[in-house]
């Protein structure tokens, strides 16, 4: 009984034998292809920079005001908490910007650019 449940688990949806989609070169019919993903990489990098800068500038304004008010009202360690919050906000903004930029770049790769490269004949082609 335990053998049948373990075999059904491995051959099921979450098993290791998932069907993979092979891309075939339209010029030489080779399956030895590679994706370039240039726009995905560039979009992720630009999105990260934009997300960090946007979040850091917004968080720095709020942290500066909060630090000034906290310094007058409470102990002197409160400005450090505001600066830490600003840095964490910038990191979160960078992560969101990276995800958004990479998703947009992937769409550009798949629809506009010749994203696939045949390693056999060096032919570049779009996603079929």
Image: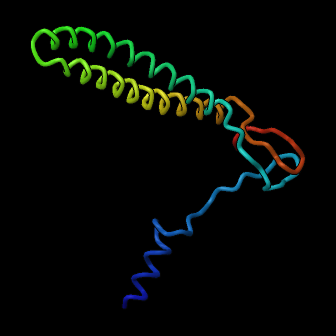
The residue located at (27%, 10%) in the rendering is 64
Of 100 and 108, nearer the camera is 100
Of 17 and 99, nearer the camera is 99
The residue located at (36%, 24%) in the rendering is 87
Coloring applied to the structure:
rainbow
The residue located at (32%, 16%) in the rendering is 59
Q: Residue 49 in the image: x percent, y percent?
A: 51, 21
Quadrant including the N terminus: bottom left
Q: Residue 95 in the image: x percent, y percent?
A: 44, 32
Q: Is residue 56 above or below residue 25?
A: above
Whether residue 104 sits left or right of residue 8 in the image: it is: right
Q: Residue 3 in the image: x percent, y percent?
A: 43, 88
Q: Residue 73 in the image: x percent, y percent?
A: 9, 12
Of 104 and 88, nearer the camera is 88
Quadrant including the C terminus: top right
Q: Residue furthest bottom?
A: 1
Q: Quadrant of residue 81?
A: top left
Whether residue 4 sits left or right of residue 27 in the image: it is: left
The residue located at (51%, 24%) in the rendering is 47
């Amino acid at each position: 009984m335990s053998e049948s449940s373990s075999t059904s688990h491995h051959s099921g949806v979450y098993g290791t034998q998932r069907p993979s989609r092979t891309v075939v070169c339209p010029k030489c019919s080779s399956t030895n292809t590679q994706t370039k993903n240039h726009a995905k990489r560039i979009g992720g990098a630009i999105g990260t920079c934009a997300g960090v800068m946007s979040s850091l500038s917004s968080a720095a304004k709020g942290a500066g005001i909060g630090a000034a008010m906290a310094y007058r009202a409470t102990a002197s360690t409160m400005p450090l908490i505001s600066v830490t919050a600003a840095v964490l906000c910038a990191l979160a903004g960078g992560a969101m910007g990276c995800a958004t930029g990479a998703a947009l770049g992937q769409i550009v790769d798949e629809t506009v650019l010749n994203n696939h490269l045949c390693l056999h004949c060096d032919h570049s082609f779009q996603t079929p």
